[in-house]
Amino acid sequence: MKHYRFHQPKITFTFILVLFTVLAYAQETRIIEVSGKVLDEFRNPLTDVSVQVKNSVSGTTTNKEGNFQLRTRLKLPFTLVFSSIGFRSQEFVVERLGAHLEVQLETQSVLGDAVVVTASRVAESILKSPVAIEKLDIRAIRETPAPGFYDALANVKGVQMTTSSLTFKVPNTRGFNIPNNFRFMQMVDGVDMQAATLGVPLGNAIGPTELDIASVEITPGAASALYGMNAINGMANLLTKSPFTSQGLSVYHKSGVNHVDNKDRNASILTETAIRYAKAFNNKWAFKVNASFLRGTDWVSNTGTDQNSNNLNTANPAYPELNGTGNVAADLWNKYGDENNNAVTITGVNYQGRSNTFILRRTGYWEKDLVNPIVENVKFDAALHYRIHSNAEVSYSYRFGKMDGVFQRGNKIQLDDVKVQNHKFEVKGNNYIFRTYLSVENTGNSYNIKPLSDNLQLTHLSNNAWGTRFKAALQEALDNQIDLSTAMQSARLIADQGRVEPGTAAFDQLKQTIIGINNWDHVNAGIADAPATGGAWLLQKSRMYHSDFQWDFSNDIKWFDLLVGADLRIYEVIPDGNNFVDFSRPVAERNKPIGNSTTDFGKNVLYKKYGAFAQVTKTFFDEKLKTFFSLRFDHNLEFTPKVNPRIAVVYTLAEKHNLRLSYQNGFRFPALFEAISFVNNGNVRRVGGLSYINEGLGYLDNSYTLSSVNNFNAAYNRDRDPALASGVVDEAAALKNKNLLEVTNLAATRPERINSFEFGYKSVLLNNKLVFDIDVYLNRYDGFLGQVEVAVPSTDKILTDGAVIDMVQANRSKQTRYRVYTNAKNVYENYGFALGTTYIIHKTYTVSGNLSYNDIAAQKNDDIFINAFNTPKWVTNISFGNRKLTEHVGFNVVWRWQDAFEWFSPLANGKIAAFSTVDAQVSFAVPQLFSTIKVGGSNILNHRYVQYAAGPTIGALYYASITVDGLLK
C-alpha cells in the first residue's frame, strides 16, 4: 500500500493558493451595474452616445430614449467617459454600487478636442499631434456633399485624389503621385489594404461600408518611422464602429445618375445599397455584419491627346505636312496598339523625286472599345468580439470584396471579378494590441488592355507585313499625285483592311478569345512576317501573412512614456507565367507551365520583411513641451537592414495654441511588382529590379537607353543610303551615329529613402469657433524608384559594332526591350505647405477652407528617367454649410480648384488642365422613421475634367440617398 503523506503539504499549499486567487478574483470581478440617462442642454435625450470606462475596453451606448446600462467587473472607483459627435466629452467618476446617473452634454461647435491615434499609434489630442493629421468623423462624413465618404477625402487639406474608375480611387499627399500609389498606405482597423500582386491599395473597394465607418484619419507625409514600408508619402487609417457601442440595424440606399450630357455614354443609373446589423450580449459577446452592393456605368477614358507629336525624332519632323491629325506616328492617350513598340519604319518611298523613310505606328483601338462599361462592387464583412474581462477583448473578423473597374499601372488594367479576402484575429487591451491577418488576392477574369490591343492587331497582320502593305498603298497613292497627308490616310485604310473592327461579332469573339489566354509572350511573334496570337488575361494570385503587436508601458514607467512594437510580413506569390515566375527555373522555362499542366508555373515566390520600433514620449515645463523620439528597425531579406528615426516636439504656447516640429527618416522597400515582376507586354518585358532577375538577361549591364536608341535611329534614317532596298541595314550609317547610343549602366534596385522635415501650428480660437492649422514641409528623396526602358543587343556586347547594328529599327528582332524598375541617380527635393481653417460665422453656419502648395526643386542634370512629380502646385477647397438650418434640415456646398500641371508616366505624358468643381447636398432628418434623406451631386455644374494623363473624363454625378439607422436596438 502506497502512502502520499509526503506530498500533502505541497498539495494543500497549492489548493490554498488557488482558492485564495479565485476568491480574490471573485472579489475583484463581481459585477457592478451602472445605469443612467444622457441629455443635451435642452434636456432632450441623446441617442448613440458612447459610454466608455476609461482605460478599459468596457463600454456601451445610449438607446433612443437616451438611457444606458453598463455592467462591468472592474473595481470601484472607475471613470466613465461620455462622448458623441458634436458634443464636448465629459467624464464622471463612479464611486458606489447601483449608481444611476443623469449626464448633460454641452454642444461643441468645433471639435478642437478630437482624439486621433494614427500619428503616434496611441490616442492623443489632435491639437498635440507631433505631425500633421486630418480627421473625418461621423458628422463630417454625413455632411459631405461627395457621393460617398471615400470621395470626401478629396476635400481634406493637402490630399490629391486620383479617380481611375467609379470603384477605384487612390489618395496621395505631397507629390509624386501615380494611380497605383505604392507610397501611400491605406489601412482599415490596422489592416493594410494593399493588393500585393496588383500593387494597388483597395481601401474604397474592399474597405468598410458607409454604415460601418466611424472615422478616417489621414497623415500627410512620411509615416514610415512608425509604420514601416509603403508609408513614405502618407497614410489613411479607416476606423470602423464597434458592435458593442454601435448596435442595431441600419440600411442605406443611394440612386444616382452620371453621363448626364450623353457625350461619352448615355445617361446611366448608379445604385448602391448597404446593410449593417450589430448586437451585443451581456457586454461580453458582440457581433456585426455588413454587406453592400454598388453598380454603375463607369467614366470613359477617351482623350485623343498625341504624346508623340510630329516634331519628335520618333515621328517624322522632316515632313511638316504630317502634323496634327495627319501624324502617322501618333501615340494617343487612350488608344492602345499605337505605342513605340509598334513602330514600323518603311524605307525607299519615292516622294518629291527622292527616296524617303517614314516612321509609322499601328492604328490601335480606343480604350472605350476594349473595357467593360458596367462596374460592380460587392463588399461583405463580419466580426465576432468577446471581452475576456474589462481590460481585454479578443475578436475575429472576415472581410471580402469583389470589384470591377479600370486602373493604370504601366498599362491600363481592366479589373473583372477581382476578389480579395481578409481574415484577422486580434487581442486588444487598454495598453496593448496583438493582431495577425491573412489577405488572399485573386484577379479573376481581369486583363491587360495593352496586349489585348496588340494581339487584336497581330492576329490580322504582323508589324512587318502591315508595313509592307502600307508602303505599297502609299507609293501607289503618291504616284497618282495625291498629297502626302491624304496618301498616308488612304494607305492606312488599305493596310487595316481585314482587321476586326469594334461593334462587330468578329471583334467581340476575338476579344474574348485573347482575354482568355494566359500567355502574353506570343506577342513576340508579331515581329516576324506571320500573324500571331497572344493573350491578355491578368491572372494573379497571392497571399499576404502579417502579424504585429504593440505594448504601451506608459503606466509602468515613471519618468517617460514608452511604446514598443514589432511586425512580420510575408508575401507569397503564386507564379502565373506572365507577371510573376519561379526564378529558380532557367530563363527560357520561366514563363512555361510545368509538364502538361496549364496552371503550374513552378514554386511559389516569397518576399519577406520584419521590423520593430520603440517610441519614447516625455513632457517638460508643466506639460507645455512634449517630445517624441522613435526608432524603427526594418529588414527586407533582399536588402540590408534599415533604421528609421523620428524626432518631434510639440510646444503649447497657451491653451489650444500648439507649435510642432519634426524630422524623420524613412525607407520604402520595392513593392512586389517593382521587385520581382517578369512581364512580357507588347514586345517589352517589364522586370523587377532585384539583381538575380537580371541573371542571363543583361539589362542592367548590357543595354542602351531607349531614348538614345530613338535618337540613334532618327540620325540613321537621315544618313541612310537611299539606294539600299527596304529592310536592308546600312551598316555605315549605323556606325557613323553609334556615339548617340547611351549605355544604361544600371545598378540593382535599392530601397527608396526619404528625409522629411515638418513644421506646423494648430490652434482653436474665439471660444471654439475658429480652427487654424498650417504645416510646412521639406522632403528629400534619395534612390527614387521609377522605370526606364532599355534595349539589349543579341549579336554582341554593347559598345561593339554588332551591338550598334542591332539597334537599327529594321533589326528590331535582334534587340530585347526591357522596362526596368530602378533607382534615380539624382536626389530630389520637394517642398510645400498646407493651410486649413474652419469658422462658425453665425450660430451653426460653418465656412471652411484649405489651400495647399507643392513643388519640386529643379535638377541640374537629367536623370535616367523622369521623376513623375505629377502634382499641381496649387489646390484649394472652400465649403459653406449648416447642419442645422432648421431642426431637421442641413446643407453643405464645396468648391474645389486645382492648378494645371505636367503628368509623366510610362503609359502617357502630357499637361493636365486646371479645373474646378462644385459639390452640394441637402439633408432631411425624419426622426419618426429613424431616417435621413440626402439629395446632392458632385461636379454639379458638369465641368468635365481629367485628373491624369490617359485617365477618365469625369463629369457630374447626381444622387439621392436614404439612411435608416438605429432599428432593432
Image (spheres, rainbow, N blue to C red):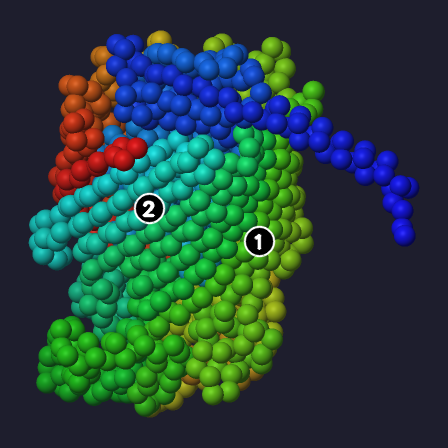
Quadrant of the image occupied by residue 309: bottom left
Q: Nearer the viewer, residue 703 or 247?
A: 247
Amino acid carrying mark 1 in the image? Arg
Rendered-image quadrant of the C terminus: top left
- The answer to which of 224 and 94 lies nearer the viewer is 94
Point 44% across, 24% down: residue: 70
Query: What amino acid is at disc 2?
Result: Asn
In the depicted structure, whether residue 493 falls above or below residue 919: below
Residue for point 20% across, 28% down: 892
Q: What's the residue at 45%, 19% (across, down)?
A: 34
- Under circle 2, the secondary element is strand
Residue that carries the numbered disc 2 in the rendered image: 290
Circle 1 crowding by C-alpha within 10 Å: few under 14, some 14–19, many from 20:
some
Label 2, label 1: how far apart the Cα atoms are = 27 Å
**Residue 731 location (% of width, % of height):** 46, 84
Q: Which of marks 2 and 1 is in front?
A: 2
Asked whether residue 420 is in view, the answer is yes
Q: Name the residue under label 1.
A: 569
Residue 830: horizontal and vertical position, in percent?
47, 39
In the rendered view, does 245 fall on the left or right side of 491?
Answer: right
Q: Is residue 72 above or below residue 357?
A: above
**Numbered disc total:** 2
Residue 471 appears in the figure: no
